[in-house]
Amino acid sequence: MLSSSVDTVILNSGATSQSATIQITASGSTALPVNVTTDQTWLTAAIQGSVTTTPATILVTANSISLTNGLYSGNVTVTGGSEQPLYVPVVLVVSGAINPSGLTLSSRR
C-alpha cells in the first residue's frame, strides 16, 4: 500500500508559483516503481532526484500566473506497481495576484 507524508497539500500563492514536497512510501520491504500525474493544468508533480522507487520525494508545484484570485483544487495521483493509486488532494489559494503587464502608470502634477 502506498502512503503519503501529508493528507492534503495546501499552497498559498500571490503572483508566483508555490511548491511543496511530499514523501511517498510503500508498506513492506520491497521498493515499488513510482509514477506521478496531476489533473489540472496549473498543477505539476515530479519525482525528485534519480530515485524513482519508494521511498520517493515528489515536488508539487502550482503555477498561479494565469489564475484569478480564488480557491482551486486538484489531485496528484501516485501509482506504484500493482498497488492501488494514491490520490493526494491539493488546494491552491490565490490572492493578491498582480499581472505586471496589465498595469497602467500615470502621473498628475
Image: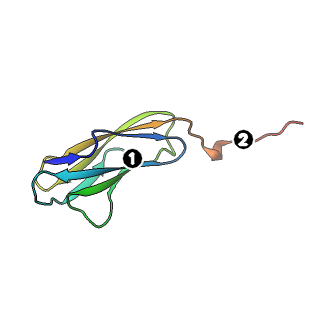
Instruction: Indicate the position of residue 77 as horizontal and vertical percent values.
Output: 25, 47
Q: How many marks?
A: 2
Where the C terminus falls, by quadrant? top right
Which labelled disc corresponds to residue 88?
none
Residue beneath the point at 48% across and 44% down: 64
Three-letter amino acid code at the position of disc 2: Thr
* Quadrant position of residue 55: bottom left
Three-letter amino acid code at the position of disc 1: Thr
Label 1 SS? loop
Pick whichever, 87 or 55, lies toward us: 55
Tell me if 30 is positioned left or right of 63 in this view.
left
Instruction: Indicate the position of residue 7 as horizontal and vertical percent values.
Output: 27, 39
Instruction: Indicate the position of residue 3 as horizontal and vertical percent values.
Output: 20, 46
Instruction: Indicate the position of residue 39 as horizontal and vertical percent values.
Output: 31, 44
Tell me if 61 is positioned left or right of 22 in this view.
right
> Quick one: label 2 or label 1, which is nearer the N terminus?
1
Label 2 SS? loop
Tag 1: Cα neighbours inside 10 Å, few (<14), some, or many (≥20)? few
Which residue carries the number 2 mark?
104
Which labelled disc corresponds to residue 41?
1
Task: Give how far apart the Cα atoms at labels 2 and 1 are.
Answer: 29 Å
